[in-house]
Image (cartoon, coloured by chain):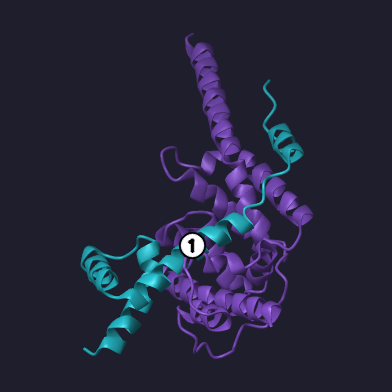
Amino acid sequence: MAEPETDARRIAEDARDRIRFEEEVLELSDQVYRVARRFVPTREEAEDLVQDTYARAFRSWRSYTPGTNLRAWLMRILTNLNIDRGRREQRTPDLRPMEEGDYYLYNRLEEAGGPQDEERIVERLSQDGVVHALAAVPHDFRDVIVLVDIGDFSYQEAAQILDVPIGTVMSRLHRGRRILKSELADEAVVEEA
Amino acid sequence: MGFESICEKCEELIQPFLDRELDEAERREAQAHLDGCGYCRKRYRFEEELRRFVRQACAEEMPPELKAKLASLRTPLL
């Protein structure tokens, strides 16, 4: 006759695990929003995307294995929802030849304004300019930059989140940062001209 | 290896160096080159600053009311 008691204990344990899970997930919401905000063009879309992510995370909490990377698990839901909902703006893939190297932006800024302290040279960029330049990077490349540079994920985590090989993360990051810098150089140098 | 090609290699290593994704041998190689090359060191510092700047410019705070909305999505306690 111990069965009802066992059941009650199981239900209580289940509820306790779920509450703990939900609290941990909610603690990550600032980080989730920061990434979501750069995945989509507007604040409203970012808010919707984060709400959908949380609704799904709460629903599917049993598919999370305790002790594994919760931040990456949550971000995987977010990226999948972003793809499913067709929220990504359709841009033609960037086919410009990327001859500029990683030093391109520094070299352009130095040329435009003469050599100066490398720690101050970045101040010639505007915050809005950076946001626009990032938004102009095609989404495949931008997603990786957002995950690694803003979300603080490792290459390996970004590969799991996006479900691509780590080599793809590295090449997209490499190319994406060069596109970003080329956009920034165009904005900064045009502004100064 | 000529001077130019060492700097070119360094240029390729700077991003993963900043991402802390180089293996120990590559990290040492990049560090040794940066210690001795003013041209790459200047650019390395710029890249470091640029990362910080991008991060700061792109980090938008979550609207406080969204936090409450998310909490309301939790499973109700029976």
| Residue A16 in view (yes/no) | yes
Is A121 drawn above or below residue A8 in the view shown?
A: below
| Residue A78 in view (yes/no) | no
Which residue is drawn at the image coordinates 56% and 75% (left, top)? A181
Is B74 drawn above or below residue A193 in the view shown?
A: above
Q: Is residue A187 left or right of residue A10?
A: right
Q: Residue B42: name its quadrant.
A: bottom left
Of residues B3 and A67, the one drawn nearer to the viewer in this rendering? B3
Q: Residues within 10 Å of mark 1 (few under 14, many from 20)?
A: some
- x and y, in percent, of residue A127 in the image: 66, 62
Which amino acid type is shown beneath numbered disc 1?
Glu
Of residues A192 and A128, the one drawn nearer to the viewer in this rendering? A192
Question: Looking at the colours in the rendered structure, which chain would you say is drawn in cyan?
Answer: B
Q: Is residue A123 left or right of residue B30?
A: right
Q: Is residue A176 left or right of residue B21?
A: right
- Chain of the residue displaying label 1: B
Which residue is drawn at the image coordinates 57% and 24% (left, top)? A15
Which residue is drawn at the image coordinates 54% and 19% (left, top)? A12
Q: Which residue in the rendered view is the most extreme toward the top? A: A1
- x and y, in percent, of residue A143 in the image: 58, 65
Disc 1 on helix, strand or loop?
helix
Question: Looking at the colours in the rendered structure, which chain would you say is drawn in purple?
Answer: A
Q: Residue A134: name its quadrant.
A: bottom right
Q: Is residue A105 left or right of residue A58?
A: left
Of residues A53 and A97, the one drawn nearer to the viewer in this rendering? A97
Of residues A61 and A30, the one drawn nearer to the viewer in this rendering? A30
